[in-house]
């Protein structure tokens, strides 16, 4: 049987204060977990400025980055420019990126215009 992988996803774009909040969260996480991540955990950062995290090269956490641009953010917001839709779209994108791993546990994601739900079969 495969060990389940836990995913921590940060959505970090826009004003610089959001990047500082993300950095503080990462530092707090590393402090709580003894400057390391449990072996079955991946940390993904969706950002429009991956270079901002260049100072994190000595960070003990293994960070995965996914670059998003303004066009992607606009697309993810949808026709009504709904900011919280970006969170759901980022999670759906992560499922697509990690499709093989998630398929092992038979997660099925359903997307409609109004909701997104994940169910374990």
Image (spheres, grey):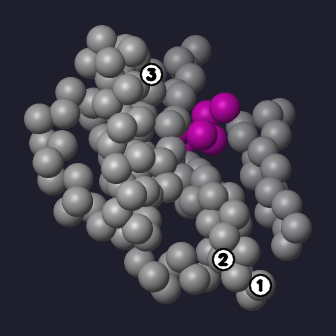
Mark 3 or mark 2: whose residue is earlier in sequence? 3
Task: Indicate whether 22 appears above or below 90.
Answer: above
Judged by depth in the image, the label closer to the viewer, 3 or 2, is 2
Question: Is 54 displayed left or right of 76 in the figure?
Answer: left
Question: Which numbered disc covers residue 72?
Answer: none
Q: CA distance from mark 3 to mark 1?
A: 37 Å
Disc 2 residue crowd, few under 14, some 14–19, many 20+, Cα 10 Å: some
Image coords of residue 71 (percent x, y): 49, 85
Viewer can see residue 89: no
- Residue 18, horizontal then vertical, whole percent: 43, 56
Alpha-carbon neighbours of circle 3 within 10 Å: few (<14), some, or many (≥20)? few
- In magenta, the rendered stretch is 100-105
Residue 34 seen from this side: yes
- Mark 3–mark 2 distance (CA, rounded to whole Å): 31 Å
Image vertical order of residue 120 relative to residue 32, above or below:
below
* Residue occupying the point 69% across, 63% down: 84
**In whole angstroms, how far apart are the C-alphas of marks 2 and 1?**
7 Å
The image shows a total of numbered marks equal to: 3
- Picture coordinates of residue 106, whole percent (x, y): 71, 37
Residue projecting furthest to the front: 17
- Element at badge 1? loop
User: CB of mark 2 within 8 Å of CB of mark 1?
Assistant: yes
Location of mark 2 (residue): 77
Asked which quadrant contains residue 79, the reply is bottom right
Q: Residue at the spot x=58%, y=15% of the render?
A: 1
User: Residue 104: within the magenta?
Assistant: yes
Instruction: Specify the quadrant that holds the C terminus.
Output: top right
Residue 40: numbered disc: 3
Labels 3 & 1 near each other (Cβ < 8 A): no
């Amino acid at each position: 049987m495969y060990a389940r992988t836990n995913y921590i996803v940060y959505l970090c774009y826009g004003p610089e204060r959001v990047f500082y909040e993300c950095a503080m969260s990462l530092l707090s996480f590393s402090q709580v977990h003894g400057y390391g991540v449990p072996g079955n955990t991946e940390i993904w950062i969706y950002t429009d400025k991956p270079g901002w995290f260049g100072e994190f090269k000595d960070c003990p956490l293994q960070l995965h980055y996914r670059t998003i641009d303004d066009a992607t953010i606009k697309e993810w917001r949808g026709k009504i420019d709904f900011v919280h839709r970006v969170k759901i779209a980022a999670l759906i994108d992560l499922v697509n990126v990690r499709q093989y791993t998630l398929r092992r546990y038979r997660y099925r994601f359903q997307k409609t215009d109004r909701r997104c739900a994940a169910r374990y079969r």
